[in-house]
């Protein structure tokens, strides 16, 4: 996955998490924030290893 696609995925998950939090869907927003954190950390570790 290219850097641009990773950035789009992370940004989309983050915005969706905020939107669900505002809407009152706290469980879904928590899952989306966790997924955002995982993808962001995987992206950072891949950059450090290369």
Image: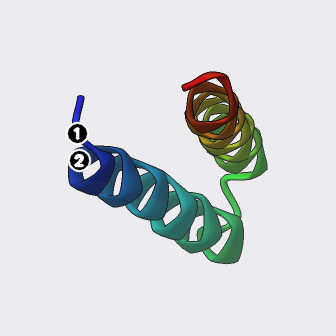
Q: Are marks 2 and 1 in contact (CB under 8 Å)?
A: yes
Which is more toward the observer, 13 or 22? 13
User: Of residues 5 and 12, which is closer to you in this image?
Assistant: 5
Residue at image position (49%, 69%) is: 15
Residue for point 44% across, 64% down: 11
Q: Which mark is residue 2?
A: 1
Q: Quadrant of the N terminus?
A: top left
Q: Quadrant of residue 2?
A: top left
Percent position of residue 16, x then y? 47, 61
| Residue placed furthest toward the bottom | 22
Residue drawn at x 23%, y 47% is 5
Left or right: where 10 falls relative to 4: right
Classify 24 as above or below 22. above
Q: Residue sitting at 62 percent across and 33 percent down? A: 35
Q: Nearer the viewer, mark 2 or mark 1?
A: 1
Q: Residue 46: percent from the left, percent from the top? A: 57, 26
Q: Which residue is mark 2?
A: 5
């Amino acid at each position: 996955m290219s850097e641009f696609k990773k950035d789009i995925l992370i940004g989309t998950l983050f915005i969706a998490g905020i939107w669900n939090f505002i809407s009152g869907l706290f469980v879904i927003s928590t899952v989306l924030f966790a997924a955002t954190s995982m993808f962001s950390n995987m992206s950072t570790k891949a950059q450090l290893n290369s």
